[in-house]
Amino acid sequence: FLVPSTSSIIKYLSIQHNELLSTTHPATMKFSSVALLGLAISSSAFTSPKLFHRRSQNVVGSLLQMSEATATKTESYEFQAEVGKVMDIIINSLYSDRDVFLRELVSNAADACDKKRFLSITAEESEGLSKPSIKVKCNPDENTISIEDSGVGMTRDELVNNLGRIAQSGTKAFVEALGEGTADVNLIGQFGVGFYSAYLVANKVEVFTKSMQSNSQAFKWESSAGNSFEISEVSDEEAAFETSGSRLVLHLKEDAAEYADFQKIEDLLNRYSEFVEFPISLWKEKTEYKKVPDVEANKDLPEGEEPKMKTVPETTTEYEQINNQKPIWLRTPKDCTEEEYNDFYKGAFRNSYDEPMKYSHFVLEGQVECKAVLFIPGMLPFELSKDMFDENSRNIRLYVKRVFINDKFEGLIPRWLKFVKGVVDSDDLPLNVSREILQKSKVLSIINKRLVRKSLDMIRDIAEDEDETKYITFWNNFGKYLKVGIIEDTKNSKEIEPLLRFFSTKSEEEYISLDQYVERMSEGQKSIYYVTGEGRENASMSPVLEKLTSRGYEVLFATEPLDEIMMESFRQYKDFDIVDASKETVKIDDDAETKKKNEEASE
């Protein structure tokens, strides 16, 4: 065998050197130079071309592995200066309720699933892509909770850009304004702070992710809410994604251990994310009871007898889909049946004991876009039976893109419609950055007017129904709210007035409306009269009634404390004054013509 010449050795090593230089990581270039030098020095000891090639390939292979190991080492990054400040604000003051962290993270997961679905339409290998879904798993032993989606995933650059800065800008002006409480942040997600809500309950967050881009590497992002974060490559086995997605692992704070309980998380998912478009599954414990032979009882069992059985619990764990409700408000009204509206009402508002008396499904388009479904309950909700304006009673639920935001907003609907239940979904609502405060604006005013108008339409429809008992039921349950509307809502009081009902001196056991009163007024009568009293019986004993009834005048009974305030709030109905007959200053309609007719009648 010929010993290779020095020039041939150097030529071969140069080829290997160039192959190493073709890699992008700086550590590779460092090792490639060392490889060239080491192989050149050791080449003089080679006595066989085969041995030379084998050894050189082994050395090059080892160096490639070393360079790869160096390339996949953990890299540290500094958060943008603004991020640290924003995280501090978010954790300490931006959110008033820590529960919303789950809403924010599930919303982000749904967005990732939505992006994957959109990109899959044009993807060449879309058939091989898994159907987007979301999984949530609690681990009380390790005090963690994980939220995983099979969405679009992220590359290394996207991890740095999306999780290392606030909405890719994070301007100092925003931070300063937010810190001072003067920021005008009206759009959800405008500043991309939802992810950082994880630190409301966690002191450390890990993000495993793999992009749906072809030949993508899986990565792990990690931070303990300090000034920096780390990104490292991980194997596909550790990432554990079928194709692509992201998994957030929240290491919970000591005072947030309750969020490692699957029952707590199930309640939050049902509250905030029950209408999210993609399937959300929760890792749950299930206990089933099975009958098994009772060994102890069957010890002395005579031959031929049936073995005695006992019931034992068997606990299993598995993923179970949580969001089975369909957002009916996003469908076309003509495609929905009355049964579907009733089922939605019972499910969404946890009202299994009654059915809605009336519903209204509508879409607001134009200057403001809004989808809504409103319901008038079949009976007075229990919480309102104790306090008609109970603060804990949630009647209107606000959603943005299927995600529940809040049900405590004031100004979305007037309080005299507190009994009306419904869902409002609009991207145009002016929410602050934490999605918790509904700010006053022209948009809110437009939606408010439409909700009031639709509510009044429903009430009128009940009043005009051929079955008069329906409105009697409505009035007995919710009549006092209309009275409050007369007092407080001057803009709509004229619309409410015809819907009022009263007992009177002529109606006996039946209610009458103001229109009915006017229709049967005596000739020459110029006013609508009423008397007050605790209950109809007391009101009917008023001493002023005889003088009025003797003239054929009908008198309304105001039998509740709220009635007197209401009657004083509107002085006229159509062209007739509304008069308290018990006032000493009241003058009974007694013009000359009326006197003459009364005298003739008395003769």
Image (cartoon, rainbow, N blue to C red):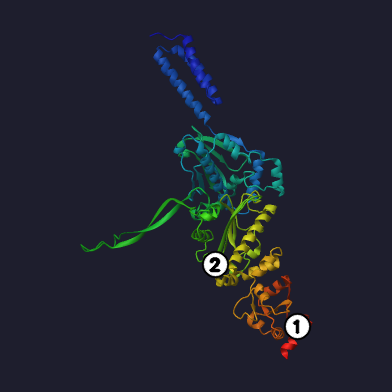
Of badges 2 and 1, nearer the viewer stands: 1
Can you give x and y, in whole percent of width and height, for residue 385 in the image? Answer: 59, 70
Front one among 293 and 398: 398
Image point (48%, 24%), residue name: 64
Under mark 1, the amino acid is Thr
Front one among 152 and 72: 152
Q: Is residue 537 above or below residue 140?
A: below
| Residue located beneath label 2 in the image | 378
Can you give x and y, in whole percent of width and height, for residue 220 in the image? Answer: 53, 38
| Label 1 environment density (alpha carbons within 10 Å; few <14, some 14–19, many ≥20) | some
Q: In what element is the residue under mark 2? A: loop
Can you give x and y, in whole percent of width and height, for residue 291 in the image? Answer: 33, 59
Circle number at residue 594: 1
Q: Is residue 341 above or below residue 557?
A: above
Quarter of the view holding residue 393: bottom right
Quarter of the view holding residue 599: bottom right
Give the number of marks. 2
